[in-house]
Amino acid sequence: MVKPFVPQLVYVEPKALEYPLGKELITKFEDMGIEIRQTTSHNQIRNLPGDNHFQRYRVAKSTLVVGLRKTLKFDTSKPSAEYAIPFATGCMGHCHYCYLQTTMGSKPYIRTYVNVEEIFEAAEGYMGERAPEITRFEASCTSDIVGVDHLTHTLKRAIEFFGQSEYGQLRFVTKFAHVDHLLDAKHNGRTRFRFSINDDYIIKYFEPGTSRLHERIEAAVKVAEAGYPLGFIVAPIYLHEGWKSGYHEMFEKLKDMLPEKAKKDMTFELIQHRFTKPAKRVIEKNYPMTKLELDEAKRKYKWGRYGIGKYVYKDEEQADIKATLGGYIEKLFPNAKIEYFT
């Protein structure tokens, strides 16, 4: 079982100590005997230990930076929400395919932001602009927030903040099973708790440092029993030998373990594996032994926004994925909603 994340090294922005959460975290890490260094900015972490890129990258993934979120303009989000709400950046998992590999670039360390009240105030502003329409906020665009929340409880505060709001809803997704501290949060049904799931082959070879499938499903059962609306992201859907039986087994496991009441209001999001040329370079540098198939010739090139295209599966493969996985969901979870396939 993957143990809850504990940083090996902590950096702190001096201003973060002016906030209660900043003080509390640094006291906690001092008591744990973790080395703490000062930094002028969470974007400027230099001199990480290690003799080469490989070592420094791994140290970075176990380094936590306690800082302030200075930009309180939220990005518009993915298909699942109107806005991304930024409580953390970076992730302690080692998923070979992850798009954070390129968006984080040279900053793979984990950042947590302590000016939580200011982030909530900004969210109030966005909700006010759209009211009386509901505004959905996605808390996991740049991090796996659950992976660090047992230390910070920022997510728990956010769940309770949105639980009290009239026009806001919260969503996030995780590959970690460390959810116990979130089970008694007063969510009032306004937070959709989603788990990223995949077949055993993909978790084994491409998702080191994350909870195993049965652990994620066990956590999902607890979350359902705590009354949260539940969702699952199947991503990345990756074609490997035996993928149809691998995914069928995954959905069967999910069906067998989940309580019936959880299946009444459940969502699925399906995302096929894709990569960009810059991502391929970074992945091969960070995970030189990866089994991940990154052959452009086997893919279709799809133009993206901002001029960066990506390599996705060919049309007939996409149709096969959609029909196969869609069929499994329809048969095993007739009341579930597939929000999108991309």
Image (spheres, rainbow, N blue to C red):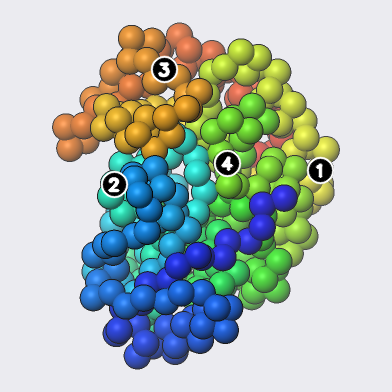
In the image, what residue type sits under mark 2? Answer: Gly
- Kindly report which numbered mark, 2 or 3, lies closer to the viewer in this rendering: 2
Q: Position of residue 110 (x, y in %)?
A: 41, 60
Q: Position of residue 10 (x, y in %)?
A: 43, 71
- Judged from the image, the secondary structure of the residue bearing numbered disc 2 is loop
Disc 2 marks which residue? 105
- Kindly report which numbered mark, 4 or 3, lies closer to the viewer in this rendering: 4
Mark 1 closeness class: few <14, some 14–19, many ≥20 residues within 10 Å: few
Q: Is residue 21 visible?
A: no
Disc 4 marks which residue? 208
Question: In the visual, does 42 lie left or right of 319?
Answer: left
Marks 1/2 in contact by CB < 8 Å: the verdict is: no
The residue lying furthest to the left in this view is 307
Residue at image position (66%, 52%) is 2
- Judged from the image, the secondary structure of the residue bearing numbered disc 4 is loop
State which tag comes first along the sequence, 1 or 2. Answer: 2
Q: Position of residue 7 (x, y in %)?
A: 51, 65
- Kindly report which numbered mark, 1 or 4, lies closer to the viewer in this rendering: 4
Disc 3 marks which residue? 313
In the image, what residue type sits under mark 1? Answer: Met
Foreground residue among 4 and 81: 4
Marks 3/1 in contact by CB < 8 Å: the verdict is: no
Residue at image position (17%, 37%) is 306
Residue at image position (76%, 50%) is 218
Label 3 to label 1: alpha-carbon separation? 31 Å
In the image, what residue type sits under mark 4? Answer: Pro
Residue 312 against residue 16 in the figure, above or below: above
Residue 251 against residue 176 in the figure, above or below: above
Disc 1 marks which residue? 257
- Judged from the image, the secondary structure of the residue bearing numbered disc 3 is loop
